Amino acid sequence: MHMFPFCCSVSSINFRQETEIMPVCPQTNCLLPQPASTHRKTSSLDGDVLSCADDADSDCRLVTENGRKKKKLNGIVGGCIAGILYKWVNYGKGWRPRWFMLDDGVLSYYKIHGPHKIAVTKRTEKGVTVIGDESLKLMKKSSRAAQGQGIEPKRRMPVGEVHLKVSSIRESRSDDKRFSIFTGTKRLHLRAESRDDRAAWIEALQTGKDLFPRISTSDLMEPMDNITVSTDKLRRRLVDEGLNETAIKETEQIMLTEFTALRNKLKLLQQKQSLLLDTLRQLETEKVDLETTVVDESQNHSKLQMVKTRHEKSSEDSASESDYDNERQDGGDEESDEDDNAFFDTRDFLSASSRRSEFGYMRTSIDSDEGLSISSVVDGADRDMEKVGFDYPNVRRRMKLPEPKEKEKGVSLWSMIKDNIGKDLTKVCLPVYFNEPLSSLQKCYEELEYSYLLDRAYEWGKRGNGLMRMLNVAAFAASGYACTEGRHCKPFNPLLGETYEADYPDKGLRFISEKVSHHPMIVACHCEGRGWKFWADSNLKSKFWGRSIQLDPEGVLTLEFDDGEVFQWSKVTTSIYNLILGKLYCDHYGTMRIHGNCEYSCKLKFKEQSMMDRNPHQVQGLVQDKNGNTVSTLFGKWDESMYYVNGDVAVKPKGYNPLSEAVLLWERSKPSLYPTRYNLTSFAITLNELTPGLKEKLPPTDSRLRPDQRHLENGEYNMANSEKLRLEQRQRQARNLQEKGWQPRWFRKEDGQGTYRYIGGYWEAREQCNWDSCQDIFGSTTTEIATD
């Protein structure tokens, strides 16, 4: 593709004659460099000349200073590139103009409208190469305004920055004005004023990116592989010296040995250099993300006072809106439980994004995986809300899945399910294209991602605050559903006797799970944290209904603290919709009752999403004491966050705004920097990882060693399908094993009935690497399982 030269540039040549005319480039409609016989025209910028290079080779080139490449445009060395580009914000705001500036490989952008706009004048942009007619008009307008009003330019704070060193640039094929920049963590969609402007920007960005050439490992290793060693000269010299043949051969061998050792050492140093370069690029990406976060937080902080004043007005609005919504709710919703009408309607203050943003100044600071940190800034907050924490060690885990080795094949879901309507999902054989590289055993542990809530609940109980313990347990119960948003692939059905362990010292957890029954399919798990134990078993009933899948969990989840307080609850119903047409989505609905053996209990209502619901995933809850009095109210969304306020919101005076007192209990972690087609969270990406030295410690039944699941994670789809078929044929004998009295290795039912409980011994066997009692369930033949 032909690349046009930069459209316009600003240099420091003064105007002298007002009658001279500058020629215009017919391609770019920009001013051309003036020949000796050409006249000039006075510029409104008074002191700067605008020119456009007609010959890129002569006027736009790279020069070298101290071995480093630098841009040279029309005599300006190392100058900045700037101009207006339209940036895609969202579907509500669309394309918005921003002032972009490229300097030393960093592309920064600023707002040009509103209270945070920047001044773009000849003073601020002196020596800057400007692209586009619209950019010039803005500079002229701002310069006149600054001169007329005597405005001092404000400090230039970018809205965001993009480091070209770690970014890739892509032109749109459907629109000759658009292009995008991918930073590794986000993608900026940009649009220029014209095709020529886009060409100039692309050339400028590529020039800036070329300042940091990427050195690949293959480039580093190639020269050494071509090195050959000749000993002819050495041999001739030794012969001239009168040495015999034996001495000559020994000398040659010594030299070759030394050379080989030096070459191997050099290879090692080159590999280390390559790793350091990759680490540098990763740090650069994280730096950009951190800088963007700092800018966003500073803007939120500046809005703090404005938000407080808006509460009064929003309270009045919510009162009238509440009356209307409650009337519709009373007439439309039916609840089987008699006392569920006590739940208030969160649509009053969660229905609009502008109101949700008002939670910003009330949020507590939570370091979800690193420990506990409670620092509420709510006016009049409880003094007990102080910093609580555990110093867990920092463990480095992987951040992304391996790159697929094969191209995935497309499979029609409808073709697979049309013959299975009304059947149990666990009995339906599906190819791996519908699976995610995790088993149901690992999914059990994934629901403990926000275990810091239980650590915090334990600390609150030690301080004698049972209410805060109950609130954190309720938030934990709701947080387990956050990982299901956008996750539409089915986890692998474990084999009978399959296990999964999770030893996460960075979270203070030790977890073990096992498939304890094949028909019905039951998985049991046990987890130990600091000051608490958690155990559960789950029997999932699932059916196809043509356009949806309904999942009804059976089983009890139990949480026991070291001081003897116990909480128990069951999970709600899950459905996956639009299997044939429309966007696939899942929803959780029903009432979850959390029973405690001490002072408090809780009831959470997961609201079912309706077809026209614009505010889905709502959760409403009440905490009650022994006498049935409501002492606290919870609300939020299971895929975003949970809040609480003291007292019963339903009996508050008309016009009461819960936003004024709401306190954040839990907030979902940020999405992964490396998204996958499975929409795995950052935590889920680590679950199937085989860290160094772990494989030797695992039993042969661990899910990480399951071959079809490992092949799917590696993108080896043909091998994954073959292994999945082999293991399912092998698993058909599990029913016979169970009928013959097969017993799970690590779990037993309490008193022969009820919930499966961990019987102990796993971690002791792990320390001794003694897995003699564990079957090779993933073996290549079926006789091993059949005869055991």
Image (cartoon, grey):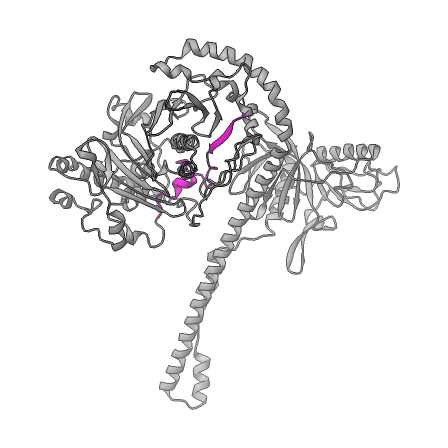
On the image, which quarter does residue 421 sit in? top left
- Residue 579 seen anywhere in this rendered image of the structure: no
Viewer-closest of 398 and 457: 457
Left or right of residue 36: residue 27: left
User: Which quadrant would the C terminus be assigned to in this image?
Assistant: top left
As for residue 524 lying within the magenta part, the answer is: no
Viewer-closest of 84 and 689: 689
On the image, which quarter does residue 67 sit in? bottom right
Query: What segment carries the magenta color?
Result: 661-689
Up-down: is 599 above or below 321? below
Q: Which residue lies furthest to the bottom in this view?
A: 242
User: Which quadrant would the N terminus be assigned to in this image?
Assistant: top right
Q: Which residue is drawn at 47% across and 32% down?
A: 665
On the image, which quarter does residue 191 sit in? top right
Viewer-closest of 447 and 598: 598
> Magenta-highlighted stretch: main secondary structure?
loop
Up-down: is 135 above or below 312? below
Residue 519, position as x, y percentages in the image = 19, 31
Q: Which residue is drawn at 47% across and 60% down?
A: 272
Number of numbered markers:
0
Viewer-closest of 692 and 359: 359
- Residue 179 seen anywhere in this rendered image of the structure: yes
Residue 269, position as x, y percentages in the image = 47, 63
Left or right of residue 47: residue 392: left
Q: Residue at x 44, y 68 (%)?
A: 263
Residue 784, position as x, y percentages in the image = 14, 46
As for residue 675 lying within the magenta part, the answer is: yes
Residue 245, position as x, y percentages in the image = 37, 86
